[in-house]
Image (cartoon, grey):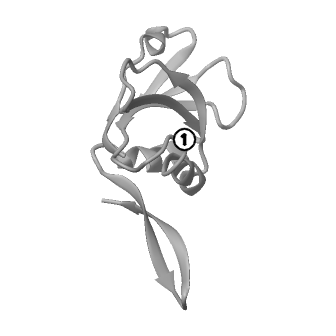
Amino acid sequence: MINIQPIPLEKYQDATTYEHVENSIYKDLADTAKTNYRIALSFELEDGEDTQYPIEDLLDKYRIHVSDFLESGAAELFNVELAGRLENLRLASSIIGKRVYNKDVVEDGKTYVSLVIE
């Protein structure tokens, strides 16, 4: 994944349903769960990447989930709204502007997949 950028969604401008917390993170006021914070991100897949990985690994690493898949207008461009606890979204927002990919790593003769953020 490359060109990871926040998306300013129009729905976030409605102060009756969303509260701006910081940077590109918003609180969904209609959601009473502890995972009611949101951030919308856009990213491009690199050659050989599919739509499942490395995004699944990011979700696991930061303990967040996709709350909405958004229109992108291009086959290689993906827009998602991520949700989770505030502290987890703060950590996840650190990928903005970085490259994220999976890399095979061999340890003790076994091959593992490692998430790389650079």
Q: Which residue is mark 1?
A: 86
4 w.r.t. 54: above or below = above
Question: How many labels sit on residues?
Answer: 1
**Residue found at the far right of this picture:** 33
106 w.r.t. 21: above or below = below
- Residue 5 image offset from top left, x and y in percent: 32, 34
Residue located 34% across and 46% down the image: 46
78 w.r.t. 86: above or below = above
Q: Nearer the viewer, residue 91 or 51?
A: 51
Q: Nearer the viewer, residue 23 or 103?
A: 103
Name the quadrant of the C terminus: bottom left
Is any atom of residue 113 visible in this view? yes
Residue located 51% across and 50% down the image: 53
Is any atom of residue 22 visible in this view? no
Q: Quadrant of residue 22?
A: top left
Q: Quadrant of residue 45?
A: top left
Question: As shown in the figure, which amino acid type bears the numbered disc 1?
Answer: Leu
Q: Quadrant of residue 93?
A: top left
Callout 1: SS:
helix
- Residue 105 image offset from top left, x and y in percent: 46, 76
- Residue 77 image offset from top left, x and y in percent: 37, 30
- Residue 56 image offset from top left, x and y in percent: 57, 49
Residue located 31% across and 52% down the image: 99
Q: Residues within 10 Å of mark 1 (few under 14, many from 20)?
A: many
57 w.r.t. 2: above or below = below
**Residue found at the far front of this picture:** 48
**Residue found at the far bottom of this picture:** 108
